[in-house]
Amino acid sequence: MANTTPSVAPARARDASEAGAFAATRRRRRYTLLTRHDKILIALMVGVPLTLDLLLIWGPTLASVFLSFTNWDGIGPVTGDNFIGFKNYQLLISGRYTLFWPAFTHNLIWLAWLTFIATPLGMLFAVLLDREIRGTRIYQSVFFLPVVLSLVVVGFIWELQYAPTEGFINNAFGLVKSGKLIDWLGNPRINLFAVLVAASWRHIGYIMILYLAGLKSVDPSLREAARVDGATELQTFFRVVLPVMAPINVIIVVVTAIEALRAFDIAFIINQGKNGLELLSILITNNSTSEASLVGFGSAIAVILLVISLGPIILFLSRTMRTTA
Amino acid sequence: MGDSRDAKRVRNRLMLPYLDAELPLNLDLSRRDMLKIAGYGSLAAFIAACGGGGTTTTSITAKGGTMSLGSYNTDPNSKKGTQAIVDAFTAANGGTKVKVNTVDHGTFQNQISSYLQGTPEDAFTWFSGHRMRFFADKGLATSIDDVWDAVKSNYTEGFAASIKGNDGHAYAIPTDYYPWAVFYRKDVWAQHSYTVPTTWDAFKTLCVQMKKDGLTPIAFADKDGWPAQGTFDILNLRLNGYDFHTELLTGKQKWTDPRVTAVYKKWSEITPYYSQAFAGLTWEQGADQLLRKTAGMYLLGLFVSDEFKASGSQADLDQLDFFPFPDLGTQYDAEKALDAPIDVYMLTKKSPTLSANRAQANAFLEFVAKGSTQVLYWQNAPGSIPTANDADTSQYPALTKKAVQIVSNAKRITQYFDRDSRPDYSGPNGMQGFLLKFLSNPSQDTTSLQGQMQSFWDSLPPE
């Protein structure tokens, strides 16, 4: 349909007349419910996002993969001399780049911490708040507040808590007076966990609100039925509510995994991710977008992180596809 | 990293996420230039010499019009100083409008290569040495031989060498510098009747005494990673000499060398006297320990005085004094080497307005080459000593005079670890992390650490 149609109704009318005129040819065409108008609309609706997706997501992704085989420093064009094959990857995997495996381990610790401590805590809070206790809205706001803050601000707040001589924690426990300072952020043995506490502070609220939304959507009659059948609170939760919440649970798992993989802000704010706070995302930044400008090498780390990230993404997509199907 | 002090301050106060890494540099050639600077003996010559007339306006400059300046001076004092310079320039140059784009120091540094490749301002603030030569080599800076010819009589040869690119052309106007030394409070020292230690043993004895007197002998703050490099520099310079230091930083010597082991060993003798929990302290918090009289000494750049000035108390600033790092009893003591980084103004290459504003930009560069302009800046940021010969030194307080003095006495000058070495090596990925690792257990056998340092160096791409 070449002409722009003022509204859908006349378009249909015209389509009908067309259908009459070309009834003979139409019979030979493949049967379709879609009109040309629909097809154009679909082409637009698929095409525009697809173009954007290719341009903004697949373009840079492929560029990263491409650059990961070079030692490009970000200045001038990439020339044949820049290609160094798998050298970047060899350097990373072999451990000769001493920060890669520590960073990898830290990401895993981050994931384990969120999975086994922060996320269950968030779910627990959600379940508790779902019980309509008094002042539930206040609690909700309190726990959710950190989520509203940017991670940069969260990092700043916690840096103030942890500062050795001026920080709240060391002062509150009298460590400044007694001279037995604990270097929460400077001691590489404990600073990762100090940062994880800060990250959890925010993560718990996030999970709580997601889960709470899910709980609200659980049909109350299910619980009632369980109660009538004599199920205990725990049984009701684990046998009835949890299975019903399966789609939300997948989201929670994926969100947790993604949060762990993209962990960056807090550690970066605190000391640019060195001295025990190395993370993959920070290595990417420190290598490719800093003054060091090791774009090729940073890209190789980015590609590895991408490959790892594909795990939860595929899990999420396959689950979503299945539930919608 | 002395030059990132503004960045540090801003970052630590506003908590913006910025990096601290450096640029890849062409060290082979720049090393030669470093040696050339050394060849002039010291900065003494160019600081002591008195210059005359300053700059003369020629046809390469123009009055009125407009120009733009990209500035990394975001620290309140240096920002004020920059604005004062710009205002004075506008007044002096027939009302030239200067559009100043001030970018946070750390951001400016981290994004410098994309900044210079994009649509930068006409002129920009930067560092001398390798980092300047790197961008000159990459064709991202405009050579300013014409301006330099007009102002060079106002500079001594050491400064002249510091702004030459590898191609021999001038690329920058040096405007200020600052030495690294051991700072202390005169009143605290008078109270305990301490005397300035000139030898390593006297230095350690003093540390013991200070500890007895309830002070933290040496304030040390390495959360940012770069401050520890200052101690590495000075120990390596005193123990192994300027030549070894510069060769080590450019990969001509190995990090596994026993001489590096000796540096760590020497260092471990004073780490027991450091501030508690130093790996979690910013340099400003370290300065506060000195300011609040809880620490006895602090090895840092002269910019520590900015922190004293920022405290708002002139009385505190008046108490600040320093001495050069003590001798270690080696043949290299005589070099009296120290870190004294130089800051500069440069012209970009890709500025879309530069061709139209070139004459105004030239006029600006000539203007900042004047002693009077640099003094104007120094009045706002007392940690930055003017470089021009015709700077009015009569208003220098004792501290600045002394700073000029110790730089003059130095026979070898270095720029600072992260200005003298590869940026990808000196940043948080590399040297900053290695030094923190060493400091977490200074008495450790450093063999494996040194092995890691060397293997990291070897892993970096060719420059």
Image (tube, rainbow, N blue to C red):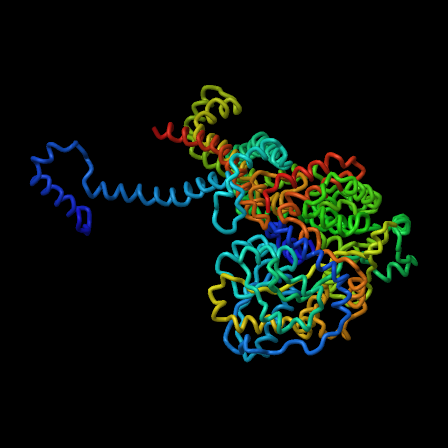
Q: Which residue is pictured at 65% across the width and 39% down the height?
A: B456
Quarter of the picture holding the C terminus of chain A: top left
Task: Answer left or right for A108 relative to B212.
Answer: left
| Residue lying furthest right | B193
Question: Which one is nearer the viewer's eye here, B297 or B214?
Answer: B297
Task: Answer left or right for A305 relative to B337.
Answer: left
Where in the figure is residue A101, as x and y percent of width and height? Answer: 61, 33
Please say if B142 is above or below B393: above
Any part of residue B44 in sight = yes
Q: Quadrant of residue B415?
A: bottom right
Q: Which residue is pictured at 76% across the width and 37% down the height?
A: B446
Where in the figure is residue A274, as x and y percent of width and height? Answer: 65, 42
Any part of residue A179 in sight = no
Task: Answer left or right for B216 relative to A35.
Answer: right
Where in the figure is residue B161, as x and y percent of width and height? Answer: 68, 62
The total number of labels drawn is 0
Where in the figure is residue B222, as x and y percent of width and height? Answer: 72, 48
Q: Quadrant of residue B363?
A: bottom right
Q: Quadrant of residue B179?
A: bottom right
Task: Answer left or right for B263 relative to A102.
Answer: right
